[in-house]
Image (cartoon, rainbow, N blue to C red):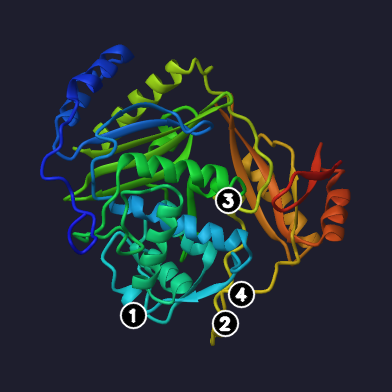
Amino acid sequence: MDHQGKVRPPAAAHRPVLALLGILLSLALAPVASAWAQVGSARYSAIVMDAGTGRILMGVNQDALRFPASLTKLMTLYMTFEALRDRRIQLGQYLTVSASAASMPPSKLGLQPGESLTVEQAILGLVTRSANDAAAALGEFLGGGEDRFAQMMTLRARALGMSRTSFRNASGLPDPDQWTTARDLATLGRRLVLDFPLLYGYFSVPGFVWHNRVIQNHDTMLRTYPGADGMKTGFTDAAGHNLVTSALHGNVRLIGVVMGAASNVERDQHMAMLLDGGFNEVNAPASRFGGSLIALANAATTFSLRPTQPAPAVVPQQSVLAPRIVRDHAIQTGALAAERMAQGIALESARLAPEGQPRVQPVVFRHRTVYRAQLLGLSEAEARSVCADLARRVSSCEVFRIGTGPLSQR
């Protein structure tokens, strides 16, 4: 740190290139040569962590200071998830976009000053488009201002053990005093998985509908690496191409971080190699996909079938001490072979309980995609009634209290 207490990057850092080259050679993958180019980069860092134990399986320059770019949004999401878990805010709560948030440079949703969006829409904007305007809006909403929110982010990061991280904004847009390390980001990724098992699913959303267009997820690892189910990409000219990935093989979850890659292709390629090496080291079995229980955030893997209602003409001043959600039940059908069939059942369930939110959740199982029809935001009585009525159409229907397991199955 300097005399003002700011974290500064070291003037020079020893980079154990040979160690990582040894790892790459041991992985015996075809596209090794292009990944080597990253290793010698002055801004390169990498680490693989066992999420269950916190053990570092491999790493290079893992404690060297780096610009986080949009990986900063992982901390913004951590703060948002914490507020949701503690019921200080709600997924459906509206936040109003300030002129400052709307003015953020791309990548963005294109929010306009005075426009309103829900907390859930802002979350989805972060995990798919990496929207800087949505990140700033969340920061202002949670912290009363983005500068204050950045201070809150830094304090929370230190409490999580991220000792070499300092945040200056909610988005990761360039700031000379915004730093982190690969180790700190792996720590943050691990805490996101462990602290918010019911919200972590947001990171695997394939896309969401915004203003009548589908916003696709930027993270190609979700589609190319078996077992990958999040987390976040990031890029600036100064930072290079950054990535945090979490992947599950059997009962073993690994968190990988690659920073300072030369391109998205090299970044993804090298992440896959590092994760393969990590899973080999812990003798993890090949990935097996299966359906997961519904959770508060299972919108992360769904497309909503009902368009989001527009914000009220006059949005009341929202308090972070929002009332507790009372419609906290949901239903989910068993796996269906056709997406259209799942859509029809979801919409039929919504006619039985008009207050509910119908969704379809795609699930990859043994390299085949199946679909689950869901209806969220119900009372327990409504959920049980809907499942009873659907019994003639589907082989199984489960009732859940959001954030827990099934209460009954039909």
State whether residue 169 is above or below residue 264: below
Q: Residue tagged by mark 2? A: 312
Q: Nearer the viewer, mark 2 or mark 3?
A: 3
- Look at the numbered disc 4 and give the secondary structure of its residue: loop
Q: Give, as a three-letter code, the residue at label 3.
A: Leu
Query: Of label 1 and label 3, which has the lower sequence position?
Result: 1
Quarter that holds the N terminus = bottom left
Mark 3 is surrounded, within 10 Å at the Cα level, by few (under 14), some (14 to 19) or many (20 or more) other residues, namely many
Quarter that holds the C terminus = top right
- Look at the numbered disc 2 and give the secondary structure of its residue: loop
- Look at the numbered disc 1 and give the secondary structure of its residue: helix
Q: Give, as a three-letter code, the residue at label 1.
A: Ala
Q: Nearer the viewer, residue 168 or 102?
A: 168
Query: Of label 1 and label 4, which has the lower sequence position?
Result: 1
Q: Nearer the viewer, mark 2 or mark 4?
A: 4
Left/right of residue 267 with respect to residue 328 in the rendered view: left
Residue positioned 86% across, 53% down in the render: 384
Residue positioned 57% across, 78% down in the render: 319
Position in image of residue 253 (x %, y %): 51, 30
Q: Give, as a three-letter code, the residue at label 4.
A: Leu
Q: Distance between the Cα atoms at labels 1 and 4?
A: 24 Å
Mark 2 is surrounded, within 10 Å at the Cα level, by few (under 14), some (14 to 19) or many (20 or more) other residues, namely few
State whether residue 124 is above or below residue 62: below
Q: Residue tagged by mark 4? A: 321
Residue positioned 32% across, 64% down in the render: 169
Q: Distance between the Cα atoms at labels 1 and 3?
A: 29 Å
- Look at the numbered disc 3 and give the secondary structure of its residue: loop
Q: Distance between the Cα atoms at labels 3 and 4?
A: 20 Å
Could you say which disc has been placed on residue 99 in the image?
A: 1
Q: Residue tagged by mark 3? A: 199
Could you say which disc has been placed on residue 314 in the image?
A: none
Position in image of residue 168 (x %, y %): 30, 63
